[in-house]
Image (cartoon, grey):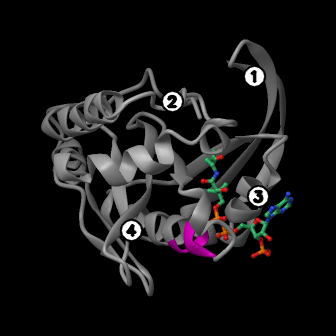
């Protein structure tokens, strides 16, 4: 989903904290869970990512359009990798360990140093839905971000109200629903209401 914070970037590039944050975003750490490895995205992930990113059901409630060709996927991976190079908030590829296949992505839609807050978002291949995998990935990202991004206080996420399974993932990861934002976003030519969730570091 589009970020509430996406226009905000690291505001104090000379501070020590900003240096640690830039290090985190430029080299996103590899995160292992029971079934998944979250790791920086590579160009060789293109066919796995195209497989799910071309599925209109996966793209239905997110702000991007389904990929029409592998060239779209390559352009997306190039963009994500350019974010690593610029030390900006970006995404991990999510590899399903038993198969060694990339089945989704998760990452930061925005980060504000001023407000000590980040926004997360994720998408997974339809074949892998309802197995607890998004919950594993989001839980791991929340824990890692609070541990490794100095000063981070709040992580938020938002979902189209017509996409309740995403809200359930947020809830299972300890995020609290804070309200419904009416017509908050324009997605695929219609205004949509979104539910805003957040977790504070003190609630971990
Ligand atoms: C939303 C999405 C990430 C969920 O991933 P997932 O791996 O299926 O999530 P999990 O299996 O960890 O949890 C899904 C939960 O939603 C529940 N759920 C599924 N369909 C539901 C529905 N229609 N209404 C309410 N809950 C639903 C599941 O039962 C499960 O909860 P439970 O463990 O209490 O039973 C996945 O469907 C997806 O990638 N969708 C396309 C992209 C997208 O919409 N991303 C989110 C943008 S905000």
Local secondary structure at mark 2: loop
Q: Residues within 10 Å of mark 4 (few under 14, many from 20)?
A: some
130 falls in the magenta region: no
Q: Earlier in the sequence, mark 4 or mark 2?
A: 2
Task: Nearest to the eye among marks 3 and 2: give it.
Answer: 3
Report which residue position mark 1 lands on: 184
Task: Nearest to the eye among marks 1 and 4: give it.
Answer: 1
CB of residue at label 4: within 8 Å of ligand 1?
no
CB of residue at label 3: within 8 Å of ligand 1?
yes
Where is residue 111 drawn, in percent x and y? 42, 38
- The alpha-carbon separation of the residues under discs 2 and 1 comes to 14 Å
Q: Earlier in the sequence, mark 3 or mark 1?
A: 3
Ligand 1 visible in quadrant? bottom right
Q: Earlier in the sequence, mark 2 or mark 1?
A: 2
Looking at the image, do the residues carrying marks 1 and 4 touch, with CB atoms under 8 Å apart? no
Where is residue 26 drawn, in percent x and y? 17, 46
């Amino acid at each position: 989903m589009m970020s509430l914070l996406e226009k905000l970037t690291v505001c104090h590039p000379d501070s020590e904290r900003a240096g640690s944050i830039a290090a985190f975003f430029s080299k996103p750490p590899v995160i292992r869970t029971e079934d998944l490895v979250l790791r920086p995205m590579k160009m060789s992930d293109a066919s796995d990512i195209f497989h799910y990113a071309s599925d209109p059901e996966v793209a239905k409630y997110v702000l991007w359009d389904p990929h029409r060709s592998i060239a779209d996927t390559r352009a997306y991976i190039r963009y994500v990798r350019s974010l690593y190079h610029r030390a900006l908030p970006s995404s991990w590829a999510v590899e399903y360990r038993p198969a060694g296949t990339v089945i989704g992505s998760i990452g930061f839609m925005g980060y504000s140093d001023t407000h000590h807050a980040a926004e997360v978002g994720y998408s997974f291949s339809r074949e892998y839905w309802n197995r607890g995998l998004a919950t594993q990935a989001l839980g791991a990202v929340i824990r890692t971000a609070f541990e490794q991004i100095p000063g981070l206080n709040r992580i938020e996420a938002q979902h189209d109200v017509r996409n309740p399974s995403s809200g359930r993932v947020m809830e299972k990861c300890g995020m609290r629903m804070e309200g419904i934002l009416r017509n908050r976003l324009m997605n695929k030519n219609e205004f949509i209401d979104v539910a805003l969730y957040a977790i504070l570091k003190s609630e971990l």
